[in-house]
Image (cartoon, rainbow, N blue to C red):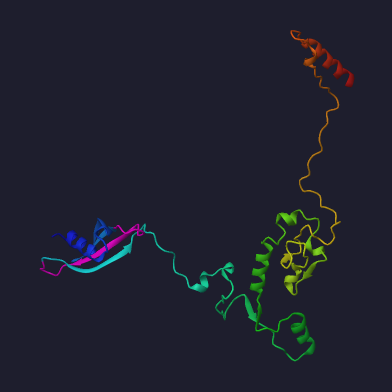
Amino acid sequence: MGAVDVARAAAIETADHPEDVAEHVDAVTIDERLVVHRFASGLKGYAGWQWNVVLARAPRARTATICEVTLLPGERALLAPEWLPWAERLRPSDIGPGHVLPFLADDPRLVPGYTPTGDEDEDFVAIEELALARARVLSPEGRLEAANRWYESDRGPATPIAIHSSAPCGDCGFLVPLQGSLGQIFGVCANAWSPEDGRVVSLDHGCGAHSETDAPVPASQWPSPSPVLDEVSIDVEVRRDLAGEGDSVDESSVAETQEAASGTNS
């Protein structure tokens, strides 16, 4: 029995079914008296995979010894995506009732909160007005990330409802401003008639439920040109239904009528 036949028999013995081992692909020498025979996989769902059978032959031995039989992916094999931990696979939309995110001690979006100093005025501003008396608060990176995400969302200025609005949210009486630096760009809508009710919106966002609905509608950036009226020439139409059967219309008289009308208007 040749080396290929020995390798094939070993692969078939390892596989669940004989048809799982297809044609012989090649043989690769990886060391002295050590050869790998590769067979195409016939397993469903394992396209591009190969059976690798390692054969070794001892000095002066007439038969090869089977060292290992494994199923390995080839160059064009279909592989599963690289494994990621559960915490890294999650997306914001994946969080539902009962789900708890793992604690991140070094989350770059957060920094330690405010520690009271004993100064009543300073502590009052930090704790009462800025609400910084928490274990951690947003870092500059966290604020910038949130601002970019909100501004580029459907609550920013580039959405159709904002473009067609008569006035921005910054002038609306239903806007509740945010505290801190984010309040310079965003607020929360408190209008039950607005589609943004209870949501964070940019100050240059807008909708049709603005508190001042009589605000002037901004001019279009693409105004339509005024229609051009031709008040010089006159189109003459001959009623052919007044002519009897067999009668013909004198085309030359029609042309003379049109010329006369044009001369009158000029």
Residue 153 percent coordinates (x, y): 66, 62
Q: Quick one: quadrant of the C terminus? A: top right
Could you tell me which residue is drawn at 78 percent across and 44 percent down?
223
Asked whether residue 56 is drawn in magenta, I would say yes
128 above or below 173?
A: below
Residue 86 percent coordinates (x, y): 50, 73
In this rendering, position of residue 25 left or right of residue 192: left
In this rendering, position of residue 24 left or right of residue 211: left
Residue 222 percent coordinates (x, y): 76, 46
> Closer to the camera, 141 or 218?
218
Looking at this rendering, what residue extends furthest in the top direction? 246
Asked whether residue 205 is drawn in magenta, I would say no
Residue 171 percent coordinates (x, y): 82, 63
230 above or below 208?
A: above
In terms of image quadrants, where is residue 249?
Answer: top right
In terms of image quadrants, where is residue 250?
Answer: top right
Give the magenta part as a residue range.
41-61
In terms of image quadrants, where is residue 197?
Answer: bottom right
**Residue 29, visible in the rendered structure:** no
In this rendering, position of residue 142 left or right of residue 238: left
Could you tell me which residue is drawn at 68 percent across and 60 percent down?
154
Could you tell me which residue is drawn at 83 percent across and 66 percent down?
173
